Image (cartoon, rainbow, N blue to C red):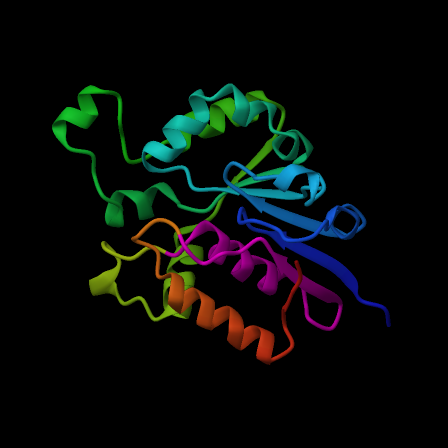
Amino acid sequence: MTRKTAVIIGNGKLHRDLSGIVDNADFAMRFNAPNLSSGMSGTRTDILMLAASSKSMQRRLADPAFWDNVAFKAAREVMLVYHPGIIRKYHPKPNMLSRLRGRRADWTMQAIELIGSAGKEVRVMPPQFYLSGCAALGVTESRMRDVFPSTGFLGICHALTRLPAGEWDVKLCGFSWEGWKRHAWQDERRWVEGKIANGLISMIG
């Protein structure tokens, strides 16, 4: 049986044009404010995964470029990876000065309202989704206020759960395993390398 193709596209630099592979895939997932890599990652987007917390989400919601992003417009579904209960329990809270400037930890309701008004279906993932991602990385309860799985990592976990290996060929591209200091980048990279070794994922680009 010929397997279907899924491409999970990070926001890192691509070294070759993958637009044909992405746009001809049966499924494509992107994250946050998608970097279309000068046209090298195509435009197909079935799911756009967002972290609706902290100042990054505040900036996105106020940025016209986010709403004009071709991948956002193409997305069939927007998925918010952090449940409000997770944000409330584990995520850093803005200090008083930041709150006076309009900062907050949780932008879930604003995201639902604005993204829904843009005509997109919005899904908020349950707390168990996040807790399972932490468990996969070995992030214990005592560390969960200091270390947070990245949106990309949680997206890969979701894809592997929903796309059976016998039916789907899951490919990754555009992952640099670097960025926000509170993500466990090396642990995430080792986890992915284990999935590659077991034939569950392949890397392209």
Q: Is residue 46 left or right of residue 129?
A: right
Determine the residue positioned at 53% across, 49% down. Answer: 12
- Location of the N terminus by quadrant is bottom right
Determine the residue positioned at 13% across, 28% down. Answer: 96
- Location of the C terminus by quadrant is bottom right
Determine the residue positioned at 54% across, 46% down. Answer: 11
Which residue is farthest right? 1
In this orientation, which residue lies closer to the viewer: 166 or 188? Answer: 188
In this orientation, which residue lies closer to the viewer: 108 or 139? Answer: 139
Check residue 204 for magenta coloring: no
Q: Is residue 119 left or right of residue 133?
A: right
**How many marks are shown on the rendered structure?**
0
- Residue 37 x %, y %: 62, 41
- Residue 172 x %, y %: 62, 59
- Residue 53 x %, y %: 35, 38
Check residue 169 for magenta coloring: yes
- The quarter of the displayed image where residue 71 is located: top right
- The quarter of the displayed image where residue 88 is located: top left
Q: Is residue 48 above or below residue 185?
A: above
Determine the residue positioned at 62% across, 54% down. Answer: 8
Q: Is residue 98 left or right of residue 199?
A: left
Q: Which residues are magenta?
A: 149-178
Which residue is farthest front? 15
Which residue is farthest left? 96
Q: Is residue 79 above or below residue 134?
A: above
- Residue 108 x %, y %: 40, 33
Q: Is residue 202 above or below residue 78?
A: below
